[in-house]
């Protein structure tokens, strides 16, 4: 089967047989994955903020090529906490702690209010 024949064709060639592919329905995102997953809007906002701050910390560690031990020293936390951070264990970090980690590397977090 050529690539052009496969486009728009809901069947694929598999083990010399044509097998139907399930068609998936897609929904446009609200811009906050946690709202899309059904969380209450207030909780979803806090979860999104935590996710953004955790992502920022991971990027900081990567950009500066820090070992977990070096990152722990800069952030003032145990190496095991850095491990949790880079592995995305968001449930182990409060919003307040993530803001504190930002402050420890000299950054300021600002909260914007929108209507």
Image (cartoon, rainbow, N blue to C red):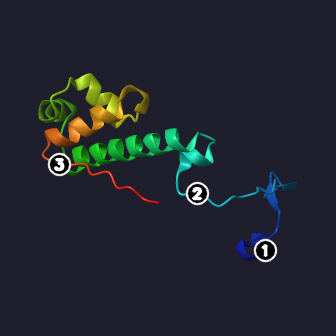
Front-most of 111 and 99?
111
Residue at the spot 46% in from the left edge and 40% down from the top edge: 47
Q: Which residue is mark 2?
A: 30
Kindly report which numbered mark, 1 or 3, lies closer to the viewer in this rendering.
3
Under tag 3, what secondary structure? loop
Q: How far across and how far down the image is residue 75, in percent?
A: 17, 34
Q: Which residue is mark 3?
A: 107
Q: Quadrant of the N terminus?
A: bottom right
**How far, Cα to Cα, is label 2 from label 3?**
29 Å
Residue at the spot 21% in from the left edge and 42% down from the top edge: 102
Image side of residue 12 versus residue 106, left or right: right
Kindly report which numbered mark, 1 or 2, lies closer to the viewer in this rendering.
2
Callout 2 environment at 10 Å: few (<14), some (14 to 19), or many (20+)? Answer: few
Residue at the spot 22% in from the left edge and 32% down from the top edge: 68
Front-most of 109 and 93?
109
Q: How far across and how far down the image is residue 88, in percent?
A: 40, 36
Image side of residue 37 versus residue 9, left or right: left
Q: Earlier in the sequence, mark 1 or mark 3?
A: 1
* Extreme residue in the bottom direction: 4
Q: Earlier in the sequence, mark 2 or mark 3?
A: 2
Q: Earlier in the sequence, mark 1 or mark 2?
A: 1
**How far, Cα to Cα, is label 1 from label 3?**
53 Å
Q: Quadrant of residue 72?
A: top left
Q: How far across and how far down the image is residue 32, in percent?
A: 52, 52
Q: Quadrant of residue 97?
A: top left
Q: Which residue is mark 1?
A: 5
Under tag 1, what secondary structure? helix
Residue at the spot 55% in from the left edge and 44% down from the top edge: 41
Looking at the image, residue 30 lies above or below residue 2: above
**How far, Cα to Cα, is label 1 from label 2?**
34 Å
């Amino acid at each position: 089967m050529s690539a052009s024949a496969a486009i728009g064709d809901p069947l694929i060639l598999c083990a010399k047989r044509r097998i139907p592919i399930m068609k998936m329905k897609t929904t446009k995102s609200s811009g906050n994955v946690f709202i899309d997953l059904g969380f209450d809007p207030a909780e979803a906002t806090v979860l999104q903020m935590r996710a953004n701050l955790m992502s920022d910390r991971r990027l900081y560690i990567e950009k500066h090529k820090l070992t977990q031990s070096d990152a722990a020293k800069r952030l003032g936390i145990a190496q095991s906490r850095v491990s949790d951070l880079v592995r995305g264990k968001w449930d182990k970090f409060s919003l307040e702690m993530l803001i504190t980690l930002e402050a420890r590397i000299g950054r300021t977090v600002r909260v914007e209010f929108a209507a």
